[in-house]
Image (cartoon, grey):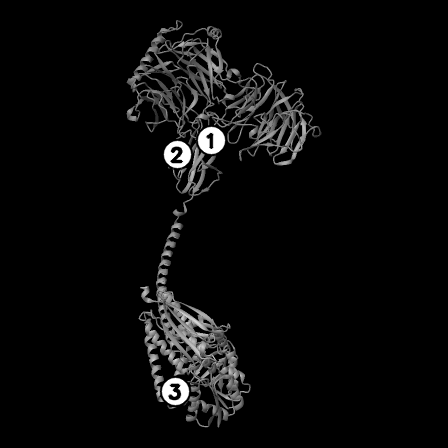
Amino acid sequence: MIRAVIVDDELKGRETLRTLIMRHCKGIEVVGMADSVASGVTLIRNAAPDLVFLDIEMPGGNGFDLLDKVKDKNFEIIFTTAYSQYAIKAIRFSALDYLLKPVNPQELQDAVLKVAQLLSASTSNRRNVDALLSNLQENNEPKKLALPNTEGVAFVNLDEIIRCMADANYTGIYLTSGKKILVARTLKDYEELLSEDDFCRVHHAHLINLRHVREYIKGEGGTVLMSDGTRVEVSRRKKNEFLERLKAI
Amino acid sequence: MLRRLFLFLNGLFTLTSKAHRSPFVSKLPRPTFLSFRSLSFFIALSFSFSLSFSFCFAQQGSFTHFGVEDGLPQSTVRSLLQDTLGRLWIATDGGVARYEGPRFTVFHKKDGLAEDKVTAMAKDTQGRIWFGHWGGGVSCYDSKTDTLFTVTLAQVKVNKPISAILADKVGKIWIGTEGLGLISFTPGDTLSTKVYGRQDGLLAKKIYCLMQDSKGVIWLGTELGVVRFLPMESRFAKMAFAEIMDDDVTAILEAPDKHGFLIGMRHYGLWDIKSELGDVWKCKEVKSKASASFHAVNTLVNDGAGHILLGTESEGLISLKGCNNSGEELHYTIANGLASNQVLSVLYDREGNVWAGTFLGLGKRSRADVQRFELREEGTPTPVYCVLQTIPQKAFVLGTERGLYQFDARGEQRLLGTIRSRVNALVRDRTGMLWASVPGRGVARISEEGSSVTWLERIAASTQVNCIGLDTAGNVWIGTLREGVFRVDPKTMRVSDFGISDGFQSNSVHTLLCDRAGTMWFGTPGGFITRFDGQKFKTFSEKEGLTDNFILCLAQDQQGAIWCGTYDGRYFKQSHGRFESVAIGIDYAPSAMVFDAQNKLWVAGGNGLFCYSNDTLNPSKSGLTGIEINANACLVDEAGDLWLGSMSGLLNFSPSQSLRNQQAPILHIDRMLVSFRPRLMEQDMQLKYDENFVSFEYTAISLTEPSKVRYQYQLQGLDKEWSPPSQTSSISYPNLQPGDYTFLLKACNNDGVWNKEPLAFRFHVAAPFWKTWWFWLILLLTLLFTLIAYIQWRVQSVERKEQQKTELNKKIANIELKALRAQMNPHFIFNTLNSIQHFVVHNDPDSAQKYLAKFGQLIRTILSNSSLAYITIAEELAYLELYLELESLRFENKFEYTINCDAELDTSEEIPSMLIQPYLENAIVHGLMHLSGKKGAIHLRLEKMDTTLKCTVEDNGVGRQRATALKAAMRPKHKSMGMAITSERLEILNNMNNSGLRQTVTDLTDEKGQASGTRVELFIPLSSEEE
């Protein structure tokens, strides 16, 4: 049985989530609820839950502040938020889970199931939490990307990534160290995640770090010579966008 | 008419001749053979001595005077010099004058001379002129820079008169002083000054003259005789001559043959010194024709033609032929126009003029090339009618008004024979007998010595003989008036006569000529020319080209062609059996014609003597004018000299030493003015386009007759031809077009001798830059470029405007979209939905329905309002109320709100849609949400202020400061989109409509000074007032 607590400032929010958990999820018990950061910290310390549903937006401090204040993070976290783009980006960078309110019962079930698997596998996303907090500390823009793979989670700085290449439902990430990390996410996910950080989708199979472009060779679409010496084809349709973004750097 | 008059006079002359018939001569009746009556040789001889003829040289030339009144600074002329430009420099006691032709330029101490009194002058190889002064000063004139300056000698102070100055061939200047000996220096080298004295072997202290000979030896005339200075040995050597006393040597001249010297002494005459075998010298005193010594010679000059000119202290100027006075000796004194007999300096200029500087002024004698010998009897010159050369050299027989004279060029003469009346024609046959025509007496045959005279019987006393000649066979031909021509064989004395019946067209023969081929030519008055080739006579008339029948003179040129001159002043030349008219430039009827050895035709006629040669365009008149030459009284001797018989004596000149002044003037462009400003001239000068007013000032120096100098100029590039000759010595060319020009200038002297090579000065006037091709090219390119640039700019500007417009529209659309999204704050929407989910989850369908209905209404309002730029105040108010209601529901009545609307406000007026909502949301989210301990309150108030809607949003929240602090603590940093978008919208609205939207924010405090909320005032101009 997973022991869970809910931290949310809105009464309606807390009650709705608790009701949904009870109706749709098995093997999980809500052992407490808190309506602010301060009461949440106390609750977690006292109840020692396995799982915390943590609302990000709260008056007098948000969910991340709470995480800062909890010393032993022996629990998994599912963030809940009505709407917080920046927080969600950071969370995704760290490969953590979140729920959007109003809560979709199916998503809730999946998230809880994933947590149950983690718990049963005795693995943890805690390192990811650290990464999240570290990313949040840096000025707004998260720089460390968590890459969950078969061996666990690799944390890489964005400037270490030269390019990403689609490989069916996986994505191969090529690093400056010469290593290639295969991640079970689509290239589209990374395009969404990284397009604000000087990454550009130059081809349906390629996402490149513009800062690692060494040379552009003209052609119909052209070819880009990357800093590691690899050549990446640029599709005709993406050429203009690519050149404009390259210029903007 | 004139011709008739001539014939009439001729006849008249014959009549008068008859009246003077001599009683001594009678005629023997021998029709075919000549017989002579001898006359006593003694009678003839006594006649010759009884008549006192003086035969003298005359016309030796006279001097023209120049004095202070003509421009000299002072009248004592101590030195004369001609510089390289031909200008004459005159040193006087009161300054230096420079004569350039018609004018004198005077230089004084103020112009740079060391002193006014100039005692010596010399020119050096650099074209400089050096002046020595009475007080010891030295001055110099540099013609290159046209500057005159005083020369200061280093190391020595000269306070004695400088009596002589010499610039030697290596550029050294030598100064002879009266008391300080000899000084030398090199110009420009102050250390080079050297004073020579006893230590150098120079004992004399007074140097009177200096001369450098052709070998480079310097000769000094001193108070102790002649001293030589050998520059190579740097040694002085006194010349000791046994015959000559030590005396002041005042003049030294190297002999024209370079083998000796002439030395003029103050008291002991003039000496001719010849070098013989090295340094052995032979002395001989040169004396006058009267065997007198020439004392006190101030200066000696060689005229380059074998004459020595002596300037003497009291006897004027004396000209000697050669160093030994072997020829004529001419004396020029006050009687010849000199101002004084004290001649201090003499100059023979390049044109042959002699200049004499005297104590009282300057005299000039033009070149005298004609000698006249006068035979005078009782003061009247005797006319000479014919000239006959006898052997030996320069011995002549003259036929004169008073009989025959024998004469030689030394001036010795004697009467020949006993005839004492006019002899008008004369010939000497091969036996040496003279045949003379004596008008009124007939023709006499006279022995060479004149001892026997016989008359030719066949010629009547009344016959007028015009001419006598000799053919190559030795026959004597006699041409008469109206009686035909006679031929006499001197051996047999057989006489033949010829006339019209033999082929003549006239029985009168005016002149006859035997050419070198032996053919006889007869010129007749009115009957053209008749030729006798030994067999028959042929007359040349109009058919052969002779357009004038009255022939006065005949001559044969060096090519053998016969020339004739006619009464009408026309001249013809025989060529291929015909005669052709030749324009020789004169139209006088000739009295005599002869070709000289140079094949120049000399024509005596009118009142002078003219010369014509094929290579000279203009005939030149000799210096002989106003003298009447008698008919055919001319002769060229074997030396080529011309001898002419005139009414006033015998004239002689040498065509080889031409009559003309052959020296063309020395031409010099004095300065060039460009736009009235003097400009330093340099060949190939470049002038700017606006420097196109060019003037030249120039001088041509010909000292013979400066007033007759003429100039011709041509500006190649502008003038096609030379200008007509003129005396103007400047020319201006205004407004020259761009281009290359060469200014050509030439001048002629008094005898029309022009410079062979004109002076040429090249210059270039640049084209103004706007006339050059490159300027036009640049202009064209610039225009083209400008046009292209303008078009491009225009296109770009339109494009940019379009783009701006598009961008603005995009921006507006974007901001409107953002505004819409701001209204639909995701937090608000999702939290509201969350609340509805709560009601659904907890089985409260009424509340869920009510909540959903209001939410739906709000969304509809937002969607409908956001598509409109303006909505009415009422609509805005309804929307705001709905929003506040939903917010208060969501926050479970954590705050209350009030809405006040001014009654005066017309709520149907339009305002920009959805401007106010973000202020309310801001107040709730940042001001009220963090509030604890008290219930929040938000007040919205709309008022009308003049033309503006004032909208006040006031809350009692935590205040801006704390809200900002709270926000900063949040992670991640939340961007306040709502307010940023609103500010942007305000800006765009203001930009678009210039509408004056503005907002003010006030922080509210309570009584204790704690923050107690925020007031935002928004001023919205009302649209109705705008219109």
Residue B79's disc is none
Q: Is residue B932 above or below residue B438?
A: below
Label 1 vs label 3, nearer the camera: 3
Residue at image point 33% right, 13% down: B9
Residue, disc 1:
B699
Residue B837's disc is 3
Residue B85 appears at what percent x and percent y?
Answer: 51, 31
Q: Looking at the rendering, in which quadrant would you find the C terminus of chain B?
A: bottom left
Residue B538's image quarter?
A: top left
Which chain hosts label 3? B
Q: Earlier in the sequence, mark 1 or mark 3?
A: 1
Q: Amino acid at mark 2?
A: Trp
Residue, disc 2:
B722
Residue B172 appears at what percent x and percent y?
Answer: 61, 33
Q: Earlier in the sequence, mark 3 or mark 2?
A: 2
In the rendered structure, the answer to whether residue B267 lies left or right of residue A180 reads right
Q: Is residue B849 above or below residue B67?
A: below
Cα separation, mark 1 vs mark 3, equals 125 Å
Residues marked 1 and 3, same chain: yes
Cα separation, mark 1 vs mark 2, equals 17 Å
Label 3 vs label 2, nearer the camera: 3
User: Helix, strand, or loop for circle 1?
Assistant: strand
Query: For this rendering, which residue is in front, B912 or B937?
Result: B937
Is residue B535 in sight in this rendering? no
